[in-house]
Amino acid sequence: MDAVNRKQLKILACKARMGIVEGVYNAKSGHPGGSLSCVDIITYLYFNHMNVDPIDPKNENRDRFVLSKGHAAPALYAVLALKGYFPMEWIKTLRKSDSNLQGHPSIKYTPGVDMCTGSLGQGISAACGMALGAKLAGKDFRVYTILGDGEIQEGQVWEAAMYASAKGLDNLVAVVDNNNLQIDGTVAEVNSPYPIAEKFKAFGWNVIEIDAHSFDEIDAAFNAAREFKGKPTCIVAKSIKGKGVSYMEDKVNWHGVAPKQEEYEQAMQELNAALAELEA
Amino acid sequence: MADVVKTATRDAYGKALVELGAINDKVVVLDADLAAATKTGMFKKEFPDRFIDSGICESNMMGVAAGLATTGYVVFASSFAMFAAGRAFEQVRNSIGYPHLNVKIGATHAGISVGEDGASHQCCEDIGLMRTIPGMTIINPADAVEARAAVLAAAEYDGPVYMRFGRLAVPCVFDESYKFEWGKAPVLSEGKDVTICATGLMVNEAVEAKKLLAEEGIDAEIINVHTIKPLDSETILASAAKTGCVVTAEEHNIIGGLGSAVCEALCEGGSPVPVVRVGVNDMFGKSGPAVELLHIYGLDAANIAAKAKAAIALKK
């Protein structure tokens, strides 16, 4: 990845972070922490990796993205808006009764969303089905899904993990957004999923460990996954919950609450400053 | 009666899948390690490339079915009713029902007639569970002829369908000229004294019950409710208005299934009439030969006839 590309992605991710804060603030509810932790990867996928076209969101040969940790919907919506699937103004309508942006992703309302998710553990199964569909049809589209590190406590994730490797779904990439926090505490305290990489290896996956906020590492991992044949790839992405908003970083209480006005203003100030620096 | 041909609806399901496989290359069949029992094994033999065994993980299978359906396939996902509707309820609800995906759930071994396996496998709650999912179509065929027709029709419909099949070989009610009408509850036999709304293997019992009632001068009308959702309220209301009382008959808990659906339709239709429900009386089953169990739990012609008389007695 060259410097220009890296800078462009950082700018886009910063704008996406503003979208997350804007959306959750206006909704007065939602999940900022886990949205901010995975937004760099979503930004990278839509702007630098996946074969998608906002003008033709249902193209049958497109790559698919399933946000298995559906509560990070604000991150997906911000990136979809930046990509041009729908107007950026929609972000302020998040979670409102007349909005096309549901609290969790829905294919019924939102262009660019490939699967209804939100009930944890289910997205990865649907992603397996999409990857299987590509294999059956002899198509070369690829399928990407992001799981939370708390989410992998769900048994269905491991049913799907076993299935994906047993069926040789090497067109599937599952990211574990390893921000280390879930609602009731650290994932280790609540019901430890560690060691995550070893578990996926034991389930027959190609596993890559990265820093979730380094576009160089993200780029290298997804490119390596694309070249890897015979097994699905799991990218264990070590992330910071609330990344980009100082007072939210690594704070468990920012899982599912909206910033108040002062907090919103501070977050936007910080992000604007970061953006100005990137664009300077 | 010795020459009555009996076939399980699950057999008809397997055969219909093979028929579909030959005419529609988008049909894909998933199973959860029960292909020999659900009869999807017939499809597996003919179309091995379009049969995927999910192993013993029904929850994942329903999610895979959903994802596969988004790529343009007509997906049939099979297991026993207990696991398809029970274990995987939330996956069916959130991954198939909510996005309204083109997945057909082929649920076999429904009801008490599973027999010897006992209560853990005798699912009498599936219709109730599936009925509360918005947009879910529920078909419970009476015999092999109707089962085949329903499977072929379901493949033509774009959306989720729950199809309920039995393990037990049951007599055929219909002949090959039978036409399956999507969303209808056809009047099988006209009468004026009582309406019997029956579904699944209870349709044949209703036919037999009519004969028993006729011996006592009672003229029963039989409605074959093969599609429990959406319910053909119009036909049921018209019949109830004519006869003045209704018996429902199903191999399912009397709570949540056909009996409940018919009561809802009658009450909301503005002219409720007495209803007596024949079904499993809110209890778990037990092991035993299927036919014996059907009699023990009152899922037979004799009980339908008795309840028909009870319903008539309730008329004002």
Image (cartoon, rainbow, N blue to C red):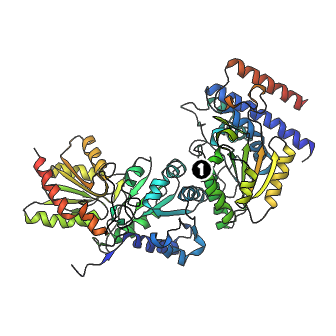
Which amino acid does the dot numbered 1 rest on?
A: Gln
Q: Tell me, yes or no, if residue B190 can be seen here.
A: no
Q: Position of residue A132 (x, y in %)?
A: 64, 62
Q: Left of B150 or right of it: where is B159? A: right
Identify the residue at image location x=66%, y=66%.
A167
Q: Residue at x 41, y 59 (%)?
A: B120
* Residue A179 shows in the view: yes
Name which quarter of the figure residue B173 lies in. bottom left
Chain ID, mark 1: A
The residue beneath circle 1 is A122
Q: Secondary structure at mark 1?
A: loop
Q: Is residue A129 left or right of residue A201?
A: left
Label 1, residues with CA under 10 Å away: few <14, some 14-19, many ≥20: many
Image quarter where the C terminus of chain A lies is top right
The residue positioned farthest toward the left in the image shown: B217
The outermost residue toward the top is A262
Looking at the image, residue A278 sits to the left or right of residue A102; the answer is right
Q: Quadrant of residue A201?
A: bottom right
